[in-house]
Image (spheres, rainbow, N blue to C red):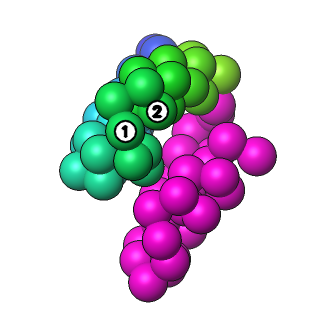
Amino acid sequence: MLAKKEKESIKKAVKKEKKNFRSLCKTNNYFAADDKSIIRNMEDLETLCEILPLNEYVALLNVSVLSRTNSNSSMYSYLII
């Protein structure tokens, strides 16, 4: 019973962080300068959302908060590395 609650808790946390991550990217126009780049970056975002574990979302969001002074393109470059 405890393991099931823990799994649900982790699942909710992952869902929340994915939403935050997507919102961050959307707010920053997917870190792109033109429409073609936006589409490519949206695809990359979805790929990241499928493969990253919870701790990676948290790390990326923390990096994004710390690097607000950097340009959008350099932030996106960090995200895809």
Q: Circle 1 sits in a helix, a strand or a loop, which is it?
A: loop
- The residue beneath circle 1 is 34
Residue under numbered circle 2? 37
The crowd level at tag 1 (other Cα within 10 Å; few <14, some 14-19, many 20+) is: few
The three-letter code of the residue at mark 1 reads Asp
Q: Which residues are magenta?
A: 52-81
Residue 53 or 43: which is nearer the viewer? 43
Report helix, strand or loop for mark 2: helix
Residue 77 magenta-highlighted = yes
Q: Residue at x 30, y 53 (%)?
A: 28
In which quadrant of the rendered view does residue 11 lie?
top left
Closer-to-camera residue (68/51) = 68
Check the image and report above or below for 28 versus 43.
below
Q: Residue at x 37, y 39 (%)?
A: 34
Q: How many marks?
A: 2
Q: Residue at position x 42%, y 45% from top?
A: 32
Circle 2/circle 1 CB separation < 8 Å:
yes
Q: Position of residue 26 (x, y in %)?
A: 27, 41
